[in-house]
Image: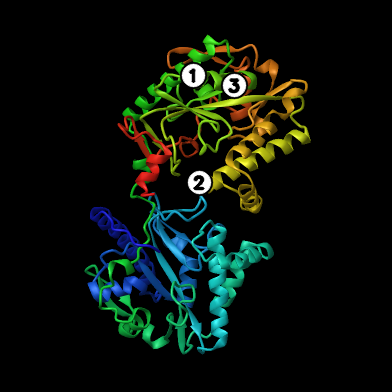
Amino acid sequence: MRYKAYDQDILNKLHEFELEILDEFKRICDENNLQYFLTGGTMLGAVRHKGFIPWDDDIDVGMPRKDYDKFIEIAPQKLKKEYMLDCFEYNKKYYLPFAKIKRNNTVFDEGFYDDNFMHKGIYIDIIPFENVEKINFSLKIRAIIVRNIVDTMFYKNGFRKLKKTRRPLFVLLLSIFTKKRLMKIQHYFMTKCKNDNSKYINALGGSYHYLKETHFREEIVPPKEIIFEKKKYMGMNNPDAYLSRLFGNYMELPPIEKRVNHVPKRICFDVIKESTYNNKDLKKLQKTLVEMLDEVVRICDKHKLDYFLGGGTCLGAVRHKGFIPWDDDIDVIIPRDDYEKFLEIAKDELDSNYFLDYYKTNDENHFGFAKIRKNNTTFQLDYQYKCHNGFFLDIFPMDYNDNKDSLSLKFDVSLARCLLDTLKYKDHNLPKIRNMRRPFISILFISFSNKRIHSIIEKLYQKHNNGKRINGGVYSGMYYYKKDIYPLDKVFPYSIVEFEGKRYHAFHDVDYYLKGLYGNYMELPKEDKRIAHKPEKLDFNTGDFKNTKEEYDKLEGK
């Protein structure tokens, strides 16, 4: 962990949310006669400050193992709907040796959960305290095994701030054992002692050295009441013994450089409210995107280049005569030959308000297609794209093949997508990368430059263009590649569709195209299935900030 000085209003609100979670945890424990106690920095805060340590941003509670196991069993049914229990027992993606209660519809993103599908809500930690008979070599072995598996799980899930000398061990463990097996081994060694009246008790999954985390049982339980933020909770039976062992002279404030907290990358107290567009902003954004589309169409019409509205833009044109109500981008498809011409022409003819973003104009580009971006605007997604983050329109090349079921085509497209993942992982450590691809990806990004990888991708996409052209296909889109392959008589000649009161080109058989992508496309999806980018930051005028890599480096003090 690191230290960060918070905006005090944000920290105060975070504390309020965490206390609400603690109260919900306490309610379940009290109703079911389960022992718990404040632990770690939360226990220290209760003794030294009668509440939170001023810079602390989480809450830690502990439970004897038998009470912890009972809590894990009953909590999913007992918790109010605002909360969820996150632990390995119920979440196969979870990898910590203790549980968390998280507040739904919130975000506390620490930046190292390498998976977008992990619940990143504001949380409290629930740490099991294990039975220990003796402080001996056997305990040391237990602690070493548990710690190495914990760190291996961190490494597997994208956390890289671990000693490089230990990484071969992590790689070896991951090559021998599945994640599920490692977690079972960890649990076995944590719970090896079954004597619930053992002389010692230990937080083997905690943050500190195992000897600091080993305490006489009577120092911990039975718990005693203590005041924390003007409320009564249960604390250690002998707080002085516990805190002295963990922190030394615990009543003395540490210097600033020794203070720690979690330093979240992002905090959000209401995801639905904060991620849903203001209708006025969405309409303004959509109007700007249509202006960008008109600029692309201007160049295509002037130079007699084919183009088609694609994906959700085509769907919106057919179903809504304009944008899908929640959509926030535009997709255009251009056949490969015309696509290459467009890229060359646009370098010179594109209006100065726009930037052509593809791998030859932007070393940081990690897409298999081009984007037109609006200068002096910001559309920042949940990862930092350290170059031009302006409003964008996607332009996908359409390539050709003579057999969509060809194994050669499947191999080439799969390899190209793996290479694209290499760029994403290399430049931004983006999370949606399958774990089984990562060893291959690591080799690739050590061996090749970004431009070399892009060059290979382009050759793979275009490899089948020299044969008989029976089908067209967009291989760099978000859908499974076979969904984005269509007979050319369904593509040409173009048809006309209405979009936001204007007329644009679409595929010849729009119904065939949309059914292939969406099935029953005229039926609105359920609200939880509606997809939009929902940027973290939306700015219609960034002024002097030009969205360049150099300017981002300045912001980060590089």
Q: Residue 348 carries which label?
A: 1
Q: What residue type is labelled 2?
A: His
Q: Mark 3 points at which residue?
A: 339
Q: How many marks?
A: 3
Q: Residue 428 carries which label?
A: 2
> Could you say whether the residue bearing mark 1 is in a helix, strand or loop?
helix
Write down the quadrant of residue 462 in the picture. Answer: top right
Of the two numbered discs 2 and 3 on the same chain, state the one appearing first in sequence: 3
- The Cα atoms of the two marked residues, 1 and 2, are separated by 30 Å
Q: Quadrant for the N terminus, please.
A: bottom left
Residue 242 in the image: above or below residue 424 = below
Of the two numbered discs 3 and 1 on the same chain, state the one appearing first in sequence: 3
Of the two numbered discs 1 and 2 on the same chain, state the one appearing first in sequence: 1
Q: What residue type is labelled 1?
A: Asp
Write down the quadrant of residue 173 in the picture. Answer: bottom right
Q: Which amino acid does label 3 sit on?
A: Tyr
Residue 20 in the figure: left or right of residue 89: left
- The Cα atoms of the two marked residues, 3 and 1, are separated by 15 Å
- The answer to whether residue 309 is visible is no
Camera-side residue of 436 and 464: 464
Residue 370 in the image: above or below residue 276 = above
Kindly report which numbered mark, 1 or 2, lies closer to the viewer in this rendering: 1
> Could you say whether the residue bearing mark 2 is in a helix, strand or loop?
helix
